[in-house]
Amino acid sequence: MATLISQNVVPKDKSEKPKRKAALDEPSPLDSVQEPDNLKGSDSVKPKKKKKERKESKEAVTEQEAEMKKLENALFGSLLPVTFGNDSEEVDEPNDDSALFFTDRSANSVLSVYEDDVVNGEIVGADDNAKRKPVWVDEEEQKVNINIAKVNRLRKMRKEEDESIITGTEYVTRLRAQHMKLNPATEWALFDSQAKDDTSDSDSDQDNGDIDTIFQTNEDLVVKGKSKLLPGSLEYARLVDANAQDPSHGPINSVQFHRNGQLLLTAGLDKKLRFFQIDGKRNTKIQTIFLDDCPIRKASFTPDGSQVILSGRRKFFYSLDLVKAKTDKIGPLVGREEKSLESFEISPDSKTIAFIGNEGYILLVSTKTKELIGTLKMNGTARALTFANGGQHLLSTGGDGQIYHWDLRTMTCFHKGVDEGCITGTALTTTPTGNLFAAGSDSGIVNVYNRDEFLGGNKKPVKTIENLTTKIDFMKFNHDAQILAVCSSMKKNSMKLVHIPSFTVFSNWPPTNRNLQYARCLDFSPGGGMMAMGNAAGHVLLYKLNYYQHA
């Protein structure tokens, strides 16, 4: 026992040294067999500890990753399919059928995903109408500031009058809105999900559908009613000259729009009749017709738009058939000795042409046969004509200062009255409805009459316009009789536009920054949206009247 105790008291390092020394000196088979057992027994604890440490570290990493994923999902939302059965808490409650969901804060919406909806890693039944995100966003747009009040073409994008500087992002948004306003999308180009759902069963759904329809359109929410043209100042815009592609080399004596509102004719003393396609930008010339033996004093479309009648200081006149593209020379008229047929008017029904003849005669010619069908005789010389009552009545005035009313069905004068303050009448015009007519004189006075009152015996004019001081050469009502144009060729810029409902002159016409030269003729488009004026310089000035929407 003592030896055993003494042997156990010996330190471990000292006892090992002889063994190592003996092993080095004399390796025995026993030692070689026993040594691996001793080493295996001494080192068997270390691999177990390492495996345990590895397992603990893996569990710690897994918990850390799970915690990070939960934090990421809470902050940014999960865009990946939800997986099941990987969490320890889920293993403890395998029968929990509660709905699993995640919050997609990037899309600002809550999506519910059920286990049955997940097939092959994809979410089935997800909302197809989810908000589409841009693929790329330019961060520099927020740093850029744009002054939209500095550039004229950008001022239309202002929401307030004093707004000037906006960010680049807001600028892009307003540009897109302006583009959508000018180029509305077509229905066939919309997504199916954007189509209107007409299968709503409740009234509330129908109301919501109506609201969605309002928000999906870029039209005005408040429809502007058809109000009357206001007096004072006329809103207009100067466009490219109507004959800019081929100006006349002489004074313009006639301008007129075709009934379609797109075709305009011009004619003058250069013996050329020109047709232009009016769009306000290019005004393309369509055709030019040259009459070698007739300086054109007047040219006019027939109201049905099928012909053009041209005349000059000649015994004959021309008729241009627009359908057949054929020009016919007509005259002299049988039984008449007139040397000039330069002034005429065409009836609204396109059946009769009334020429001013010699010594107070009015010559009536059929539009169809171009033959003389009758004559009317005034006491004085005839100077101006106009039709009324759909072509059944004819008004005339002249050297005796009186206004004649003729019934063309019976070829008789049924009324004659004195034009107040007039010595010699030089111009006449009526409204399209015929309830008003205006008479101009050589002194520059224009009297506006109510036709029914005038025929009833009341010769007092409704309004006397005294803004011009030279002979009135031309007058014209627009299509709705809210504007009366009056011009005189004897003086520069001698042209006025009269607001008929108030019988006042527009203060901003003629333009102060534009010289109209000597105005000789004028016409309004059928819809009233454009006004063309020819002057003695050979130019046809074109203006857009902003109040009217159509040409």
Image: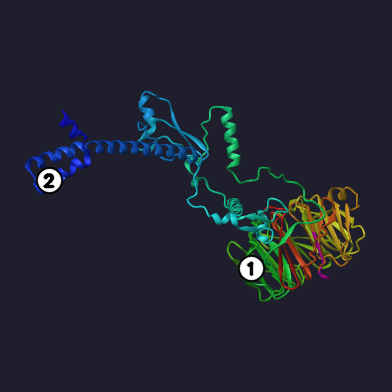
Magenta-span inclusion, residue 34: no
Q: Which residue is mark 2?
A: 23
Q: Which residue is mark 1?
A: 328
| Crowding near the residue tagged with mark 1, few <14, some 14–19, many ≥20 C-alpha atoms within 10 Å | few
Whether residue 551 is visible, yes or no, is no
Q: In the image, what residue type sits under mark 2? A: Ala
Residue at position x 57%, y 55% in the image: 141
Element class at badge 2: helix
- According to the image, what is the colour scheme of the structure? rainbow
In this rendering, the count of numbered labels is: 2
Q: As drawn, which residue projects farthest toward the top?
A: 95
Residue 530 shown left or right of residue 3 in the figure: right
Q: Earlier in the sequence, mark 1 or mark 2?
A: 2
Residue sitting at 79 percent across and 70 percent down? Answer: 518
The disc at residue 385 is none
Quarter of the rendering containing residue 154? bottom right
Query: Between marks 1 and 2, how big is the CA–CA gap?
Result: 141 Å
The residue nearer to you, when weighing 155 against 354, is: 155
- Based on the picture, tell me whether residue 487 belongs to the magenta stretch: yes
Q: Name the residue located 40 percent from the left edge and 38 percent from the top edge.
A: 64
User: Which residues, given as a range, are shown in magenta?
Assistant: 485-492
Type of amino acid at the residue the image marks with label 1: Asp
| Secondary structure under the numbered disc 1 in the rendered image | strand
When asked about the image quadrant of residue 94, the answer is: top left
| Residue nearest the observer in this picture, 89 or 475 | 89
Look at the picture and state if 27 lies above or below 537. Answer: above
Q: Based on the displayed image, in which of its 4 quarters is residue 319 positioned?
A: bottom right
Instruction: Determine whether 442 is above or below 157 in the image.
Output: below
Position of residue 399 measured from the top left corner of the image (x, y, whole percent): 88, 65
Evaluate whether residue 247 shows in this view.
yes
